[in-house]
Image (tube, coloured by chain):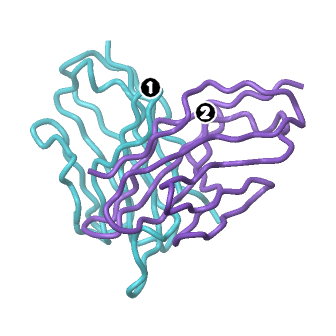
Amino acid sequence: EAGVVQSPRYKIIEKKQPVAFWCNPISGHNTLYWYLQNLGQGPELLIRYENEEAVDDSQLPKDRFSAERLKGVDSTLKIQPAELGDSAVYLCASSLVTGKRRIGNQPQHFGDGTRLSIL
Amino acid sequence: GNSVTQMEGPVTLSEEAFLTINCTYTATGYPSLFWYVQYPGEGLQLLLKATKADDKGSNKGFEATYRKETTSFHLEKGSVQVSDSAVYFCALSERQGAQKLVFGQGTRLTINP
């Protein structure tokens, strides 16, 4: 089974430029997550999708961040414009949530992340 | 709000030593608890989980017991190997609302041969 695929692995841009990250979840996984991981910290949820619907985007800074998952499969996360403080690793994860199972009990499978550096 | 506090790192041990990484949590109700591991240059992998009080999660020689009375989920392994060198994250999932994962800050473990 192929895992969660993210691209690019590394991205270096100048501040105020736009940047986009792409994630392809595990086939069949209906729930997709984007996390932000600052250096030396644990991941923090930015947004969660169930199929194509964003069901939790309360932590997404909507003035500069946007995300989409148009067909309920792969997803993109965009930052425009990027700021120095956005330098971090952006992780994507997916899980299969069915029926009435508690979302929190389902294992999340993570990609290797995109490391963003802002100059 | 909900939070997870982990033992400060980094932790350095010799091969075959006993490992304990402490984790305590603050949550409303009864969350599910997890340990994730992150090897260099890779994403996080689920190591083990426990969904209710007194449950013991185990995998690859690692164990952790859900202790409701002390709000703890300490990670242990009897004999560590060099290949266990990684960053370990304790996490909880909320029982209500968004049920998102809340992570601790991570503990970097280095095992010397």
Q: Which residue position holds label 2? A: B41
For image coordinates 32% across by 19% down, the residue present is A13
Q: Report the residue that reaches farthest toward the front.
A: B69
**Left or right of residue B45, residue A82 in this image:** left
Q: Foreground: A16 or B24? A: B24
Question: Which numbered dot is residue A39?
Answer: 1
State whether residue B27 is above or below residue A63.
below
For image coordinates 84% across by 24% down, the residue present is B112
State whether residue B4 is above or below residue B53.
above
Q: Colour of chain A?
A: cyan
Question: Which numbered dot is residue A106?
Answer: none
**Left or right of residue A88, residue B58 in this image:** right
Chain letter of mark 1 equals A
Q: Foreground: A101 or A50? A: A101
Q: Report the residue that reaches farthest toward the bottom.
A: A99
For image coordinates 52% across by 52% down, the residue present is A110
Work out which quarter of the rendered image holds the N terminus of chain A and state it.
bottom right
Q: Amino acid at mark 1?
A: Leu
Q: Colour of chain B?
A: purple
Percent position (x, y) of residue B59? 74, 60
State whether residue A21 is above or below residue B45.
above
Density class for disc 2 (Cα within 10 Å; few <14, some 14-19, many ≥20) is few
Q: Foreground: B50 or B98? A: B50
Q: Report the residue that reaches farthest toward the top.
A: A119
Percent position (x, y) of residue A41? 44, 32
Percent position (x, y) of residue A85? 27, 22
Q: Amino acid at mark 2?
A: Gly
